[in-house]
Image (cartoon, rainbow, N blue to C red):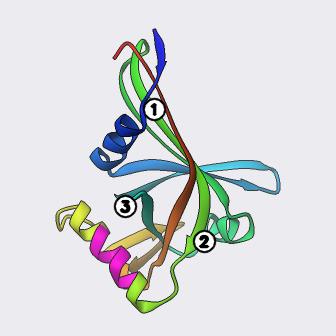
Amino acid sequence: MLRELSAQECEAMLRRHRLGRVAMRDAAGAYVVPISYAWDQGIVYAHAAPGRKVQLMRRWPHVAFQLDEVEDASCWRSVLVRGRFEEIHDEEGRAHARMLLLKAFEGHLMSVTAGHGQRIHLADAVMFCIRPEEVTGRAEGL
């Protein structure tokens, strides 16, 4: 039976995972790509190499972030975060975001990020966050 997840269940899922998908618009419609992230104090923190994803989020900052837990077609959970992309420019904020990501990945986060053939150091990556405007979740069979 389909049910809504509570705010606490959504928060637990967002804390538990490290990979999700961010959706944004482009001139032709929608664009969805996977990202690694850290969830801290109600905010999604992530990084990216300069490229299409970053260009689109800068142009149209309203984005969606989604993650799933799937056992099978009738047993799954999903969380959707609708919010606003904010690029982190100040060095203190960038350092904070990098620290959160490194901590979330227990030191296993790559020292570089990839994007359309680009490989750059995490220190040179575009650091950003998604500030939620709405967090919802659904589940079936769990």
Q: x and y percent of residue 98 in the render?
A: 33, 76
Q: x and y percent of residue 74 in the render?
A: 42, 12
Disc nearer the start of the sequence (2/3): 3
Circle 2 packing at 10 Å, graded few (<14), some (14-19), many (20+), is: few
Q: Residue furthest toward the top? A: 1
What distance separates the C-alpha of mark 2 from that of mark 3?
Answer: 28 Å
Q: x and y percent of residue 5 in the render?
A: 43, 28
Circle 3 packing at 10 Å, graded few (<14), some (14-19), many (20+), is: few
Q: Is residue 3 above or below residue 118?
A: above
Q: Nearer the viewer, mark 2 or mark 3?
A: 3
Does the magenta-highlighted stretch encompass residue 107?
no
* Dominant secondary structure (helix, strand or loop) of the stretch shown in magenta: helix
- For the N terminus, the quadrant is top left
Kindly identify which residue carries mark 1: 78
Q: Which residues are magenta?
A: 94-100
Is residue 109 rendered to the left or right of residue 27?
left
Kindly identify which residue carries mark 3: 41
Residue 110, visible in the rendered structure: no
